[in-house]
Amino acid sequence: MMDHDPEIQSLIRQWTPPDASPDLDGRMLDRFHSRRSFWRRRVSVRLSIPVPALAAALVLLLAGAAWIGLEARARASFRDRMGGFEPVAAPELNTSAAVFRNEVRQ
Amino acid sequence: MECEAEAVQLAARGDAPAFRSIWDAHRAAVYRFACWMLADRAAAEDATQETFLALIERPERFDSTRASLRTFLLAIARNQCRLRRRALLREAAMEEAEVAGPEAAAAFESTEAAARLNAAIAALPPLQREAIFLFEYEGLSLEESAAVAGTDVGTLKSRLHRARQRLRRQLIRPAKEKFR
C-alpha cells in the first residue's frame, strides 16, 4: 500500500488553476442544447464491426472482384482469338444421282 | 452511484436539469485536471466541454458499478487533454515555442514560489504529471488513479515515485539548501 506524501501534497496543493471564463457555463449549455435532436438520435444507428471481421470481409470482396475480372478477361481473350472464325458448312451428299446412274447402266 | 447513472441517462436524452446537475458537480474537477495537464486556459476549457459532451454522446459507456462518475469523467478528460496536447505541440513546433514549459505556465504565476512550482509541474513528463495530480492533488485512491490513467496500480506507483523524486529535487532540496 502506498500512502500519500504529506510534504509533496502540501506543496502541490498550493497550485490553483486559473479562473475559468465567466461564460464557460453558458457556452457549455449552448452546446448541450444545440446537440442533435432527440428524433435524429433515435433514427440514427451506430454500427460497430470488429476490425478482423471487417478485414476478412474486405479480403473476400477484393478476391471476388479479382476473380470476376479474370473471368471476364479470359472470356474476352477467347473471343479475340476466335475473331473472324466462321464454321465451315457441312458438305451436302447427294446419293440419289449415283443410284440413278447405276440404274441406267443395268 | 445509481443516481449518477440515472442522471447520465437523462442528460443523454436531452434533460437539461440532469445535465446541469452533472456539470455543476464535476466541472471544477475536470477543469482543474485539464489546466494541470495543459497549462493553457483556453485549451483546458475546450477539453472540459468536450469531456461532458462525450459523456452524453455515449452514455452507455458509463458503468456505475465499475467507477464513480468523477473517475469516469477524468478518464475522458485525460484523452481530451492528450488530443489537445498534441495539437498544442504541433502549433508550438510551427511557432518554435515550448509547450507547457515555463512560458506556457507563466499565465498562472503570481509569486516566485508559484513560478517555481509551475515550472516544476511543467517539467514533469505527462504520465508522471497526471499520476501526481490524481493521487496527491485530487486525492483519488491508487486504484481510481490507475483507472483514470488507463494503467495498473504497479505502473502508477512507479510513476508516482519518479514524480515525487523529481518534485523533491526541484522544489524541496533547493529550498533547504537556501536556508543552510
Image (cartoon, coloured by chain):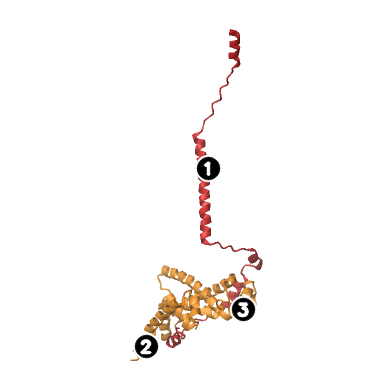
| Amino acid type for the residue under numbered disc 3 | Glu
Q: Residue at x 50, y 37 (%)?
A: A78
B30 horizontally vs A45: left or right: left
- Residue B19 position, x and y percent, is 61, 76
Residue labelled with disc 1? A72
Viewer-nearest residue: A31 or B11: B11
Q: Residue at x 49, y 79 (%)?
A: B143
The hue in which chain A appears in the rendered picture of the protein: red
Q: Residue at x 47, y 69 (%)?
A: B87
User: Residue pushed farthest right?
Assistant: A39
B35 horizontally vs B53: left or right: left
Q: Circles 3 and 2: CB distance less than 8 Å?
A: no
Which chain has been coloured orange in this picture?
B
Viewer-nearest residue: B170 or B158: B158
Please say if A59 is above or below B171.
above
| Amino acid type for the residue under numbered disc 2 | Ala
- Residue A51 position, x and y percent, is 51, 61
A36 horizontally vs B104: left or right: right
Q: CA distance from mark 3 to mark 1?
A: 62 Å
Instruction: Provide the chain ID for the residue under circle 3.
Output: B
| Amino acid type for the residue under numbered disc 1 | Ala
- Residue B113 position, x and y percent, is 41, 86
Q: Nearer the viewer, mark 2 or mark 1?
A: 1
Quarter of the image with the N terminus of chain B is bottom right
